[in-house]
Amino acid sequence: MMAGDAGAAVLETKDEGPKIPDKNKTKFDVIIIGAGPSGYTAGIYCSRAGYDTLILSGILPGGQLVNTTEVENYPGFENGIMGPDLMIEMRKQSQRMGTTIIDDVAVDVDFRHKPFKVLTASEEYEGRAVIIATGANPRKLGLEGEETFAGKGVSYCATCDGPFFRNQDIIVVGGGDSAIEEATFLTKFATKVHLVHRRGELRASKIMQERALNNEKIKFHWDSAVTEIKGDQKMQQAVLKNLKTNEESTLDAGGLFVAIGHEPNTQLFKGQIDLDEDDYVVLKNKTHTNIEGIFAAGDVHDRNYRQAITAAAFGCMAAIDLDKYLTESADK
Ligand code: NAP
């Protein structure tokens, strides 16, 4: 940005540090629901474009990355960065641009009338436009050891964590496209990948199945479930149970990737925003929902990429489209 142009002037006026939220202020140009990479990026772009922007961050500001350890694949950090640190940086950057961030949970929305309303337990906020950036959560196995060893062997993202498990045996649980894609990807690093599936046939597409079934580094454990995850500082073993014979066996493995699907956080929008059969937000023209002025960004609509960098990019796209929408509605 050249000195003297409008963008530089905006930056100069925002250098006074993070904005302290005005507790009595309830009307904004833009409300962003969710504070993962997509929400914060949308906040940076909307505030920088001059819109009075509110982020309602939910219970866990930072989203899924707060539960991650090292992030090695987010550009700009030669030596990697810890997930929570990356999210703190994004939050501060958004605040520096002027975004108001309130660490509260949206419990209801009313998108039927303009201005749109987003409600928390104690407040009602109004926005001329809204970006839904509530993300998705990986489905969990529900085992005790799963939480104990999360980030210490147990992972929900092969692209993110696969390279940490070079030359080790790895377990993948699931039988859908994600599990097969992750198992195949993990053969690049693992000595052996053990695919554990609860049934005797895969749900994944035929072509992906064939590729995995022909891969000598993948061993299939059919009709099986992981019943226990064991270790000390890190995970070292998993107990498998054959669901037909009830026979138990122990596998030595440094990593366990849970790939049994995701659940988008869209409960709040049911009946107002078009969702697909798996409850992901349906988009038209890349970022627009079925309601003019309501946009969505990140894992709440994206079931394919699910990366911090792609979520951030979707947040940027939603903010640019929102800018166009608000500019055009002001002209009308
Ligand atoms: P998914 O298709 O819902 O498959 C989930 C798998 O996990 C199923 O095999 C299911 O077993 C198993 N499972 C569910 N709950 C379980 C539990 N509690 N314990 C053990 N296993 C459990 O989910 P996904 O694989 O994440 O795919 C989601 C969507 O994204 C799909 O539409 C998929 O086609 C798409 N996708 C596409 C690609 C690609 O094309 N490259 C890649 C990834 C995802 P059952 O089979 O017995 O139900």
Image (cartoon, helix red, strand yellow):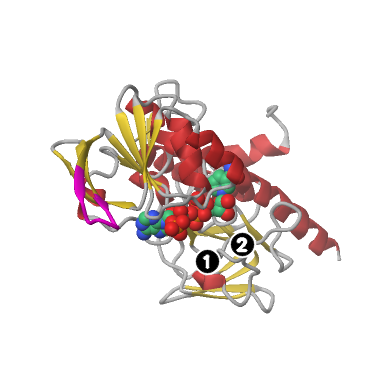
Residue 253 image position (x, y, % from top left):
25, 34
Q: Which residue sits furthest front?
A: 245
132 vs 271, nearest the viewer: 271
Residue 263 image position (x, y, % from top left):
47, 60
Residue 186 image position (x, y, % from top left):
43, 31
Q: Which residues are magenta?
A: 241-249
- Distance, label 1 to label 2, CA atoms, is 7 Å
Q: Quadrant of residue 271?
A: bottom right
Quadrant in which the C terminus is drawn: bottom right
Quadrant in which the N terminus is drawn: top right
Kind of residue at disc 2? Val
Q: Which structural element holds mark 1?
A: loop
Q: Is residue 260 left or right of residue 113?
A: left
Residue plotted at (25% across, 38% down): 152
Residue topped by disc 1 = 266
Q: Is residue 274 left or right of residue 23?
A: right
Q: Residues within 10 Å of mark 2 (few under 14, many from 20)?
A: many
Q: Is residue 114 left or right of residue 28?
A: right
Residue plotted at (45% across, 49% down): 175
Residue 28 against residue 133 in the figure, above or below? below
Can residue 20 be seen here? The reply is no
**Residue 242 belongs to the span the image colors magenta:** yes
Residue topped by disc 2 = 281
Mark 1 touches mark 2? (CB < 8 Å): yes
